[in-house]
Image: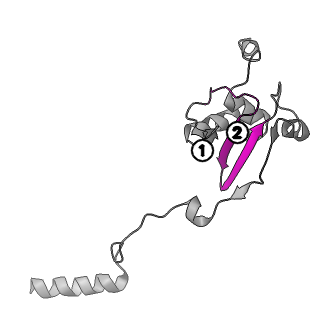
Amino acid sequence: MAEADDDAGPPRLDKWLWFARFVKTRSLAQALCAAGHVKLNGETVRRSHQKVRLGDRVEMLLGTVRRTVTVEGFGIRRGPAPEAQALYAEPEPPRRLTPAEDRPVAPRAAGSGRPTKRDRRRMDALHGDLEE
């Protein structure tokens, strides 16, 4: 019954994300925070036990969608979707990341990757000439 003590004050961030139905489990909410995909009032959250307060701004990256919400209330249970939507206000619609933002590709010099079949044949021919 240690859970009853937590209900007295503002909820933990992982609980709030779960109550508001942004994630399916509290474990996923904790993993989201640990991965640095959640910002609370502009600061990256690494620990999911941080408390949320009314008016806090929560930014999260859920897959390829970036959502920014304002905390409007606290839940006492994980209820149906209309009840969960009453916990937050979304000032701007969710934004899908562009491919460049989603998975930035490390720059690579031309020819620095795996050799093509043509390149390999040329190298084999060059090595064959050197061995004779």
Compared to residue 31, the image places residue 107 above or below, namely: below
- Label 1 sits on residue: 37
Q: Residue at x 56, y 42 (%)?
A: 36
Q: Position of residue 84 (x, y in %)?
A: 84, 37
Q: Residue at x 87, y 37 (%)?
A: 86
Q: Quadrant of residue 8?
A: top right
Camera-side residue: 80 or 124?
Answer: 80
Q: Position of residue 132 (x, y in %)?
A: 9, 87
The stretch of residues the image draws in magenta is 48-71
* The magenta stretch spans residue 81: no
Q: Nearer the viewer, mark 1 or mark 2?
A: 2
SS assignment at label 1: loop
Q: CA distance from mark 1 to mark 2?
A: 14 Å
* The magenta stretch spans residue 56: yes
The answer to whether residue 131 is left or right of residue 119 is left
Q: Residue at x 34, y 86 (%)?
A: 118
SS assignment at label 2: strand
Q: Quadrant of residue 20?
A: top right
